[in-house]
Image (cartoon, helix red, strand yellow):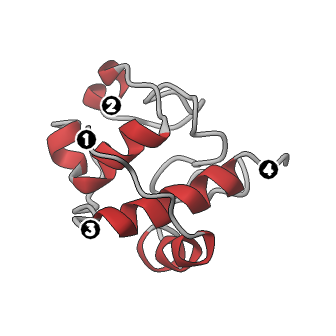
Amino acid sequence: MADIPEGDYEKGKALFKSRCLQCHVVDSKATKTGPTLHGVVGRQSGQVPGFDYSAANKNKGVVWTRETLFDYLKDPKKYIPGTKMVFAGLKKADERAHLIKYIEVESAKPL
């Protein structure tokens, strides 16, 4: 696996607002079109209570870490074939790293 850049929180915040916020939140337990991302780091895929995941996502069994998120965010449909997520992914490694940095920080804050 390639080294993952550190990422920049502010750039990740801007990416989250422009690419993720329409479907996800990171600062609450609410679900939108997609599940909350609060507490996502360290959580197994398909495990937000009450969210209607695809069978592919529930059965993937991946634990979300910096590394697995980095791979997933490049091409979600390739990483989890059958996912309902329509996001095409972020091809640029630095953009994925920025987004992960923001999600790591925000999703770990107490509610």
Label 3 packing within 10 angstroms: few (<14), some (14-19), many (20+): few
Give the quadrant of the N terminus: top left
Q: Which residue is mark 1?
A: 83
- Residue at position x 30%, y 62% from top? 93
Label drawn at residue 57: 2
Q: How far separated are the C-alphas under marks 1 and 3?
A: 21 Å
- N-term-proximal mark, 1 vs 2: 2
Label 4 packing within 10 angstroms: few (<14), some (14-19), many (20+): few
- N-term-proximal mark, 4 vs 1: 1
Tag 2's secondary structure?
helix
Residue 99: give x, y in percent of width and height. Answer: 48, 63
- N-term-proximal mark, 2 vs 4: 2
Tag 3's secondary structure?
loop
Q: Which residue is mark 4?
A: 109
- Residue at position x 27%, y 45% from top? 2
Q: Which residue is mark 3?
A: 92
Residue 26: give x, y in percent of width and height. Answer: 64, 56
Tag 1's secondary structure?
loop
Tell whether label 2 touches label 1 (CB within 8 Å): yes
Number of numbered discs on residues: 4
Say what amino acid the circle numbered 1 marks.
Thr
Tell whether label 1 touches label 4 (CB within 8 Å): no
Q: How far separated are the C-alphas under marks 4 and 3?
A: 27 Å
Label 1 packing within 10 angstroms: few (<14), some (14-19), many (20+): some
Tell whether label 3 touches label 1 (CB within 8 Å): no
Say what amino acid the circle numbered 3 marks.
Lys
